[in-house]
Each structure stands twice: as C-alpha cells, then as structure tokens.
Amino acid sequence: MREALVEVKQLKKYYPITGGIFGRTIGHVKAVDDVSFAIRKGEAFGLVGESGSGKSTTGRTILRLTDKTAGEVKYKGVDLHAVSKQELRRLRPSMQFIFQDPYSSLNPRLRVGDAIGEALMDHGLADKSEIRERVQEVLALCGLAPYHIDRFPHEFSGGQRQRIGIARSIILQPEFIVADEPVSALDVSIQAQIINLFSDLQEKKELTYLFISHDLSVVEHLCTRIGVMYLGSLVEIAPRDELFARPLHPYTRALLSAVPIPDPRLKRERIVLRGDIPSPANPPKGCKFHTRCPLATDRCKEEVPVLRLADSDHQVACHLV
C-alpha cells in the first residue's frame, strides 16, 4: 500500500451566523464537520454527495484557500494550516486547484498565454524567454493548438476553457490537484474527453487527485477510492469497485440507485429519499441522515455513528452495519 500524501484529521469548517443590531454570533453553519480521510500518493480519491454536502468547502479548506475551524491537514507530513505564509507560498506550486466554472476562473482581459504563464513568473520558476515555450507545451499536452496562446477566453468553448484551466494548474508541475466538479458544467460528450484527459495526465505526470463531484458515474471512471459526504460529514469510504458492488450506508445505496444504466433491458430499484436535506446550521441530533433514512432506529436518533472499518479497506458510519 502506498504512503499517504495528504492526511485530513477531524477537519471542521464552521461559518458564523450573526444577528441583532450588534452583529453577534448566534449560531454556525457547519459546512464541514469532523471529516477524516487520507489520499495515497498517485491515486485519484473521489468525494461525492448531494449539493450542499460540504465537498467543495472540504477541498478549499484542504488547500488553505479558506481557513479551518478545527482539525489538521497534512501534506507530506507538513500541517498546512500551521505553517507561515512564506512556507505556504513555497509549497503552493506542488498543490493546485481546478475550479468548477472554467470561464469565471479566467480573467477575460488576459490572453490565454498570459493567464497560464503568470504563475511561472509569480513563483520565479521561468524566465520571460522560456514562458511562451512552456505554455505551448502544456497547451499541447491538454489538447489545444499552439496558436490558442494569443486568444482571449471568450473565443473558446466550455470544454476548451476547462482544458485551459487544467493547463494552468499543471504548468507548475504539481504533485497534488484538487478538482472541484470540473466537468459538471460541460456536455456529456465533452465530459468524457475531459475525464480521459485527467486520466492521461495522471499517468504521464504521476499526479494525485482529490476529485469532487456529485456524479457517481464520473468518479467511477477516474477514481480508485471514493468518499461519500452527507451534510458535512463522511458516511462511507471504500475502493471504487467495492463501493459500487457492495454499498453499506443507506445514503450511498440511494445515490447509486439514481445512476442511470445505459441498457433499457436492465432495471435497478430506485430508492427515493423522503424529505429535504436538513439545514447545516441546525443538523439533526444523532445520525444526520436519520430524518431521511428508511431504516432509522431510535438509536440513530440519539447516537452519532462513528466512521469505522467494516472490511479491510471499507469504512462506514452507520449503526446498522
């Protein structure tokens, strides 16, 4: 088993709710609540769940794009939230982020070559004379033509813009990339191309991914292990094949039942969850999923389940397992 490149332990990110004429804190939105997992070197770890489950906030907090409330995040044994800004800046090139919306993440006034190459200048990793050649190399690696270097973002399609976002992240030769729903805004045919690009780059560059998505069929093609989030907490972590073949948590089963099967002769029993997702500002007592779980017991309403091993590499947070 490979060593862990990134270790997340009991990570919490709460946003204060203020009220009254003095703006006092009257509560907290618990976006990420006691999350722990590890990402092994060279693997693609998928993080899935419904919108509002805390996936994106987890990714941003891991890279210290937003400050944590509690817990720790270690990259190669270094606590990212404990190091100085100077040390964090030194580590930045090896950790990159790919945003969900490729257009809004690009400056419309900058040519593509400048948008991709400015990080090299900022970190002092290349001379001005070298930057254009380096940019054209990563453009070719991401399936774009050399002449695209002088065009502006509005001259590209959505898929091409995401390729530009990927090129901007890999030009610094990172080891770890957090991809925040990078294909959710794209057509299905383009999604397949971008997923294949991620896979090719992982093989060529020996990259490690945290791949965030709400689409289980997407992470099935790219990720080797998958974590399932619900209302700010992890409810299940398992190898991809194990998760799809033998999901243990009722929430994971419900998610998988919604994945379409591309064969009209095959049918899957659809599990429809009742009710809406509770507010992260006022999560339910006990198991957070018990208000929608068809199997919930009295114990689920009172006692918080702990994420524990159910098999050799399969963790689940459920009293019924």
Image: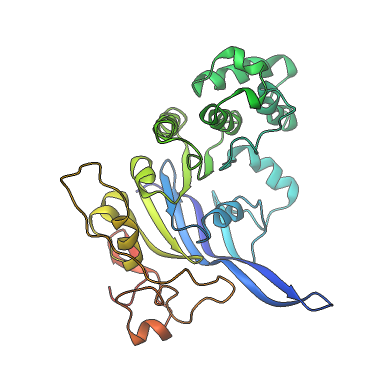
Residues 148 and 190: in front is 190
- Percent x, y for residue 20? 79, 79
**Position in image of residue 105 (x %, y %):** 65, 38
Viewer-proximal residue among 188 and 56: 188
Quarter of the view holding residue 287: bottom left
* Residue found 40% across the figure and 56% down from its top: 227
Q: State the image coordinates of residue 279 (x, y, percent, origin top left).
A: 55, 71
**Which corner quadrant holds the C terminus?**
bottom left
Q: Please tell me whether residue 115 is drawn above or below residue 59 in the rendered image.
A: above
Quarter holding residue 123: top right
* Residue at the right extreme, as displayed: 22
Q: Is residue 245 left or right of residue 215?
A: left
| Quarter of the rendering containing residue 304 | bottom left
* Residue found at the far front of this picture: 264
Nearest the eye: 175 or 236: 236
**Looking at the image, is 232 positioned above or below residue 157?**
below
Q: Count every numbered label the image shows and give the total.
A: 0
Look at the image and tell me whether residue 36 can be seen.
yes
Residue for point 50% across, 24% down: 142
Instruction: From the viewer's perspective, tell me whether residue 146 is left or right of residue 19.
Output: left
Image position, residue 300 (x, y; %): 37, 81
Q: How is the image coloured?
A: rainbow
Taking the view exactly as shown, the residue that stands out farthest to the left is 265
Q: Is residue 223 visible?
A: no
